Image (cartoon, grey):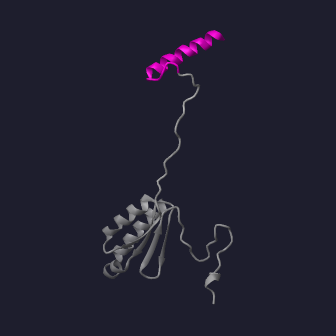
Amino acid sequence: MVQLFMAMEKIKKGLSGLFGRDSNFDEDYVEIDVEQRERKSKIVIRPFVIKKFEDINEILSALREGYTIAVIDIRQIKSRDIVELKRAISKIKKTVEALDGSVAGFGENTVIATPAFAEIYKPGMSMPSGNPAPSRDPLFEE
């Protein structure tokens, strides 16, 4: 057993010299800094306007970064070309679904798209507690 220990010490000293460590290195472990530096970014609610199909590229990039909730005004493309509007919404929807996000229309001219960290409330949807959401907010009742 003593010979094995001595052999291990020789190997340890040889390796420590090889990697530029002090030959008196006696620790049986190596410390690894596992602390990850988190990106300290705020969530951004950002307005976008789609005038033509190519305008969605900026929206998709912002959503892929993961910190942006997109509030998209579709009024201009809607008045020009319904086919382009449908293509744009379809592309946004597919990207958001791939990111596990949410997308929903608000009114006739606004679409909201979120990445995975946020979910858009839709009527009939249950709240995180498992209870159904109230149909009206009690704070705003008359």
| Whole-percent x, y for residue 106 in the image | 48, 79
**Residue at image x 40%, y 73%?**
72
Q: Residue furthest top?
A: 3
| Residue 57 x, y percent position in the rendering | 34, 64
Quarter of the N terminus within the rendering: top right
Question: Does 119 sit above or below residue 79?
Answer: above
Question: Magenta stretch containing residue 61, yes or no?
Answer: no
Image quadrant where one finds the C terminus:
bottom right
Q: How many marks?
A: 0
**Residue 94 is drawn in which quadrant?**
bottom left
Q: Residue at x 53, y 41 (%)?
A: 34
Residue situated furthest bottom in the rendering: 142
Q: Which region of the structure is painted magenta? A: 1-24
2 with respect to 102 (left or right): right
**Any magenta on residue 3?**
yes
- The structure residue drawn at horizontal position 35% and vertical position 67%, both measured from the top left corner, is 56
Residue 109 image point, x, y percent: 41, 80
115, above or below 20, in the image: below
The dominant secondary structure in magenta is helix
Question: In the figure, is residue 134 to the left or right of 118?
Answer: right
Horizontal side of residue 93 vs 130, given as left or right: left
Q: For this rendering, which residue is in front, 37 or 108?
A: 37
Pick whichever, 39 or 21, lies toward us: 21
Along the viewing direction, whichever of 69 and 111 lies nearer the viewer: 69
Q: Give the percent coordinates (x, y) of residue 114.
A: 48, 66
Residue 4 relative to residue 46: left or right: right
